Image (cartoon, rainbow, N blue to C red):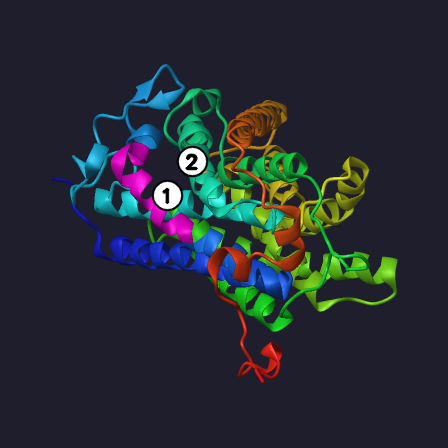
Amino acid sequence: MQAINAGDTAFILLCTALVCMMTPALALFYGGLVKQRDMLSVMIQNFVCIGVVGLIWVFGGFSLAFGPDIGGVIGSIVPYFGMYHVGIEPHPTYGPNIPFIMVFAYQMMFAIITPALMTGAFVGRFRFGAYLFFIALWTILVYLPAAHWIWGGGFLAALGVVDFAGGIVIHTAAGFSALVTAAYLGKRKLAPGESESEPASLPLVALGAGLLWFGWFGFNAGGAYAADALAAYAFLNTMLAGSIAMLVWMFWEWRENGRPSFSGVLVGAVAGLATITPASGYVEPMAALFIGAVGATVCYHAKHVQAWLKIDDSLEVWRAHGVGGMTGALLIGVLASSHINQVSAGIHQLGVQLLAVAIVAAYASLITFILLKLLDGMNVLRVPDTIQQEGLDTPLYGERAFNFWDMDRGNPK
């Protein structure tokens, strides 16, 4: 058995826990941004991914993503099904200094948060039962193949495509699928005169954003699978990109509206973190600053494209994650340094990155549309208009996010 490095193992244990925390953090972030009457509906959609995707990962998911390659398209389901052959002995390719079981656990957290990212795009419109089937099938048909293509030795990896922590596999796939889902479900049904944007709790959004940022250090630095110099670069690059993106987003918003907003500051930071994700282990820190600034600029102005498309992406998932992940993945071809991780910027690298982004975005969009069509054909997809106007929390879950000592129920007499 290969030697297990205690320091590297402890580092990946910590990173795995940090990435796990990001899914509840996302629930807080999204829950605070939506209307109070829909808070629980979006938060349960996030949390339930831990159970649904976690089971899929055990029973074939990990093997399909990281098992022996079959034609460059998918991994074999046999070797690791039910965690067979997933033990403490290190894998020579994936984390050669840590127990293989930690590679399994770390990658599980990535699989869990990916479908959860989409939930902010279709707030208040997706039936919960249909959502459970949707995320299960989406994970199997979209996430697992995409992960194999780039991380598991598939055909895109063979072409030289790189994605350090998921700008293509996670953010591009989820972002474009979110856009398709929001377009298919149509605009939210609101009461006459009601605003689309009424955040339930900006302090809750801030808490979620802060925890997401904290978890993102594990999300990106853990991709090194070792407590080494590469992890240190990814760690610092994450901080720098998020910091400058926050300020650049604030600049554009201030310039356009005459004042900054707290929600804009928080969303801008998340956009920068999403943009640096694919490049975090391939660029110098000064390049990370540039990537964060470009990411915030591109994501901010992508609102004009979204307005032209007339798609009700409730929390602008496509802008922050789809556009951000895509931008960061392409900038690898412009700014990657071979001194960091043996990947050099150039026309060839930019070309294969562009090809990968196009393939994953198109594939994810197509499969998402087919899944929605199937669920719609079963008449189980959309929440009725009356419930959309009333809010999903009480009719669908029998609970409310806030009670305030029953003051909103009126006098029972």
Residue 15: % across, % down: 37, 56
Residue 302: % across, % down: 75, 43
- Amino acid carrying mark 2 in the image: Thr
Write the residue at 37% across / 43% down. Answer: 53
Residue 258 or residue 282, whichever sits in front: 258
Q: Residue furthest left?
A: 1
**SS for tag 1?**
helix
Q: Which residue is mark 2?
A: 139
Write the residue at 46% across / 50% down. Answer: 220
Instruction: Kindly identify which numbered label has been placed on residue 403.
Output: none
Q: Quadrant of residue 200?
A: bottom right
Query: Is residue 388 left or right of 94 when viewed as pictured?
Result: right
Q: Which residue is mark 1?
A: 53
Say if mark 2 contacts mark 1, CB within 8 Å: yes
**In terms of secondary structure, what is the magenta stretch mainly?**
helix
Answer with mark 2 or mark 1, whichever residue precedes in sequence.
Answer: 1
Query: Is residue 77 left or right of 169 when viewed as pictured?
Result: left
Query: Is residue 359 left or right of 298 when viewed as pictured?
Result: left
- Give the magenta range: 48-62
Q: Residues within 10 Å of mark 2 (few under 14, many from 20)?
A: many
Q: Residues within 10 Å of mark 1 (few under 14, many from 20)?
A: many
**SS for tag 2?**
helix
- Amino acid carrying mark 1 in the image: Val
Residue 152: % across, % down: 37, 29
Q: Quadrant of residue 89?
A: top left
